[in-house]
Amino acid sequence: MTITQWHVPVDDETCYWYAMFTSFKTPVDKTRMRDQRLQEHRLPDYAPRKNARNNYGYSAEEQGKITYTGMGLDINVHDQWAVESMGRIQDRREEHLGKSDVGLIKYRRLLRAAIAAVEGGETDSLKMQDSATRAIRGPLSNDAIAPDDNWVAASEAADAERRDTCPWDAAV
């Protein structure tokens, strides 16, 4: 089973968390999945039991002996911490980026250019609007270990093998 997750900003301080579970062999056991989620979340608001107010369940002893994070074995708690611990959206106008931040600088310029294009009604030039992008189907599950530095080929091969053994049409 694979999980695909999105953390979608709602405002400057909060986000929605969406999760999609895909089973390539047997139907997803919805009761089991719900019971697992309810170990970490409460009803009726589905709020996480581990959160900033209780330091995401952090335990220094656990971190020293069991897990790297010290926040339990549920990776969703780790993801929640990574998303929430950054805090509010920051004012980057006084930020001082260095040479090692060149990728970040280029990405921000690309993002600003895309925003300006959309605001100006120029959506045809955006890269995500071409025919090749519209043909993408997926998601590709990237959980393979490559025997060399060609992780793309290893991921594609693992995904193709998983899809080929499905009892349903999982072709990409």
Image (cartoon, rainbow, N blue to C red):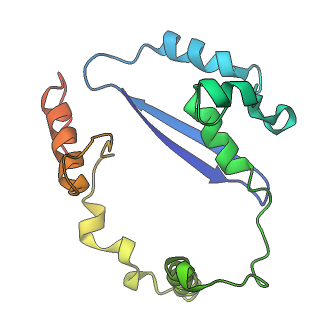
**Front-lying residue, 7 or 130:** 7
**Front-lying residue, 149 or 18:** 149
Work out whether 145 lies above or below 75.
Answer: below
Image-based side of 113 in relation to 134, left or right = right
Residue 46: x %, y % from top left: 72, 26
Query: At 59% across and 24% down in the image, what residue appears?
Result: 66
- Total marks drawn? 0
Question: Quadrant where the N terminus lies?
Answer: top left
Residue 79: x %, y % from top left: 60, 42
Check the image and name the residue furthest to the front: 64
Work out whether 113 lies above or below 72.
Answer: below
Q: Is residue 172 visible?
A: yes
Check the image and name the residue furthest to the right: 53
Query: At 36% across and 73% down in the image, what residue appears?
Result: 129
**Quarter of the rendering containing residue 58:** top right
Residue 44: x %, y % from top left: 77, 21
Q: Can residue 71 be seen in this view?
A: no
Work out whether 96 lies above or below 26.
Answer: below
Image-based side of 41 in relation to 126, left or right = right
Query: At 23% across and 57% down in the image, what residue appears?
Result: 149
**Quarter of the rendering containing residue 109:** bottom right
Work out whether 37 lies above or below 82.
Answer: above
**Front-lying residue, 76 or 112:** 76
**Front-lying residue, 169 or 74:** 74
